[in-house]
Image (cartoon, rainbow, N blue to C red):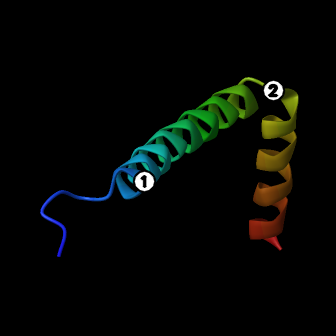
Amino acid sequence: MQSEPDPAHINITILQNILSHIRVYINNFLIFSESSSPYKKINAVISKRGKNI
């Protein structure tokens, strides 16, 4: 029985937290860059045409 948590397990959880934060940051950056790009407008036009059909 260990009274203290395993330091390796602590490091893994810290790394998972950092990776999840990085993933959220990258997703937000991609959303922001897409919203300012012409591809976003093209996709919006295509999706509107698809809804009309």
Which residue is located at x 78 percent, y 38 percent? 40
Which residue is located at x 84 percent, y 60 percent? 49
Q: Nearer the viewer, residue 18 or 49?
A: 18
Disc nearest the viewer among 1 and 2: 1
N-terminal label among 1 and 2: 1
- What's the amino acid at mark 2? Ser
Q: Is residue 4 left or right of residue 10?
A: left
As drawn, 43 above or below 28: below
Q: Secondary structure at mark 2?
A: loop
Q: Position of residue 16 (x, y in %)?
A: 48, 51
Dividing the picture into quadrants, the one containing residue 33 is top right
Q: Is residue 6 left or right of residue 40?
A: left
Quadrant for the C terminus, please: bottom right
- What's the amino acid at mark 1? Ala
Please rate how many residues cluster around mark 1, counting C-alpha atoms within 10 Å: few if below 14, some from 14 to 19, many from 20: few
Disc ID at residue 16: none
Please rate how many residues cluster around mark 2, counting C-alpha atoms within 10 Å: few if below 14, some from 14 to 19, many from 20: few
Q: Secondary structure at mark 1?
A: helix
Disc ID at residue 37: 2
The reply to whether callout 1 and callout 2 are in contact (CB within 8 Å) is no
Q: Position of residue 52 (x, y in %)?
A: 78, 67
Quadrant for the N terminus, please: bottom left
How many angstroms separate mark 1 from mark 2 (CA)? 43 Å
Q: Nearer the viewer, residue 4 or 22?
A: 4
Which residue is located at x 40 percent, y 53 percent? 13
Q: Position of residue 48 (x, y in %)?
A: 76, 57
In this view, the residue farthest toward the front is: 1
Which residue is located at x 12 percent, y 63 percent? 3
Disc ID at residue 8: 1
As drawn, 3 above or below 23: below
